């Protein structure tokens, strides 16, 4: 229960960063924090039915569920892809406008 | 307090409450996690895929096509990021002349500040640490079928080793790997990534799976036993090379290391 509340806090920190920060790089890292919170939630839930790594040949038989772990492998890779692409876009915007501030960018690109 | 600030604060509170309302029901209920999938995999995973690491058994045995799609996602993101960085490098920095920006386009600021980001600790440690990290990455990649690890994890460790090399070989670095060795340059990395991706696609065809089965049968006929898990090891190695070279290429481009 405490662990899940902490995961919720982590997710909300990510949302807060995404909404409140104006720097594009900080927004990207807020997205990465939200992604980590989701990954942690899945791994945490899968580990509620066991306490050993899902490797056959170990001493006991109470593994954690390997299915969420395999799913989260995909989620981590997709999260890295999102971060990389977002950072590359931020870099391009910085080169074009000389700032990473979203409000500045809106003003400079004439969308305000 | 200005009206805009009050409105912003109120909007923030509303967003916090709404996001709590969306996320909390996922986290709060106490439904027990189903054990059926775990028990089925524990009973049949090793026999059906040959991998004693059940996570590897899932993503390379039962769900190998999903993993193929995942590598395609990684490839697409990498292509986008690399082309964006390459295009951004050619555009002059906003408000500057093209000639000034082309000097060292990736960082704007006083020269001494750029210097400070690049300390002697990094220069002397990074290049020496790289071989150890690369060896560990190869171990994680090769033994992913039976111990914690696998292609993606090993690939990321290999990528960090290549990043160490890239940091250690920059100007002033005393990394042990000579600056003229271009195996870890962007061009070689992108070639390695492309060939590893081709290997993954080739390994995923049903023809190659049946060819592998035929090879196993032929080998056992002449007395050499090829374990069933070697298919998963081959997939792990090609995924590891692809992920490693891809992530390393992305980071080397971001470091600005394409000036071979």
Image (tube, rainbow, N blue to C red):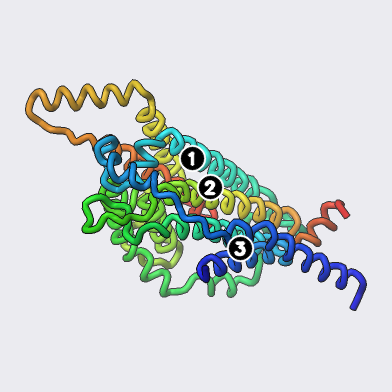
Residue B246 is at least partly visible in this image? yes
- Identify whether B76 is placed above or below A100: above
**The numbered mark 1 sits on a residue in which chain?**
B
Furthest residue toward left: B223
Task: Identify which residue is drawn at 24% across, 25% down.
Answer: B213
C-alpha span from label 2 to label 3: 17 Å
Q: Secondary structure at mark 3?
A: helix
- The residue labelled by disc 1 is B70
The answer as to whether the residues below labels 1 and 2 share one chain is no
Mark 2 Cα-neighbour bin, 10 Å: few <14, some 14–19, many ≥20: some
Task: Identify which residue is drawn at 40% across, 63% down.
Answer: B168
Q: At which x and y percent is residue A71?
A: 46, 47
Q: Quadrant of the N terminus of chain B?
A: bottom right
Quarter of the figure with residue B166: bottom left
C-alpha span from label 1 to label 2: 8 Å
- The residue labelled by disc 3 is A11
Viewer-proximal residue, B5 or A104? B5
**The numbered mark 3 sits on a residue in which chain?**
A
Checking the image for residue B115, the label placed there is none
- The residue labelled by disc 2 is A78
Q: Are marks 1 and 2 in contact (CB under 8 Å)?
A: yes
Horizontally, is A74 left or right of B50 in the view?
A: right
Residue B248 is at least partly visible in this image? no
Q: At which x and y percent is residue B35?
A: 39, 49
Quarter of the figure with residue B50: top left
């Amino acid at each position: 229960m405490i662990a899940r509340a902490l995961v919720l806090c982590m997710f909300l920190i990510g949302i807060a960063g995404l909404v409140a920060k104006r720097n594009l790089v900080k927004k990207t890292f807020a997205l990465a924090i939200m992604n980590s919170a989701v990954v942690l939630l899945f791994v945490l839930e899968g580990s509620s039915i066991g306490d050993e790594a899902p490797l056959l040949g170990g001493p006991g038989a109470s593994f954690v569920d390997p299915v969420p772990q395999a799913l989260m492998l995909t989620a981590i890779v997709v999260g890295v892809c999102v971060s990389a692409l977002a950072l590359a876009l931020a870099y391009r915007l910085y080169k074009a406008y000389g700032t990473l501030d979203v409000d500045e960018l809106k003003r400079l690109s004439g969308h305000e | 307090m200005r009206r805009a600030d009050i409105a912003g604060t109120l909007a923030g509170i509303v967003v916090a409450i709404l996001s709590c309302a969306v996320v909390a029901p996922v986290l709060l209920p106490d439904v027990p996690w189903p054990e059926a999938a775990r028990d089925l995999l524990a009973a049949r995973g090793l026999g059906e895929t040959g991998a004693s690491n059940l996570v590897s058994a899932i993503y390379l045995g039962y769900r190998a096509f999903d993993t193929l799609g995942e590598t395609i996602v990684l490839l697409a993101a990498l292509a986008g990021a690399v082309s964006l960085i390459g295009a951004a490098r050619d555009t002059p920095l906003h408000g500057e002349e093209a000639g000034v920006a082309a000097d060292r386009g990736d960082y704007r600021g006083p020269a001494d500040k750029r210097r400070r980001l690049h300390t002697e600790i990094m220069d002397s440690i990074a290049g020496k640490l790289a071989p150890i990290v690369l060896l560990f990455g190869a171990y994680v990649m090769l033994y992913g079928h039976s111990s914690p690890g696998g292609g993606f994890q090993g690939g990321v460790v290999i990528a960090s080793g290549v990043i160490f090399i890239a940091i250690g070989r920059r100007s002033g670095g005393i990394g042990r790997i000579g600056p003229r060795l271009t195996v870890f340059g962007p061009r070689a990395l992108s070639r390695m990534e492309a060939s590893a991706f081709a290997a993954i696609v080739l390994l995923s065809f049903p023809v190659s799976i049946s060819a592998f089965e035929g090879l196993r049968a032929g080998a056992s006929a002449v007395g050499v036993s090829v374990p069933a898990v070697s298919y998963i090891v081959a997939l792990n190695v090609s995924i590891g090379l692809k992920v490693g070279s891809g992530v390393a290429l992305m980071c080397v481009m971001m470091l600005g290391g394409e000036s071979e």
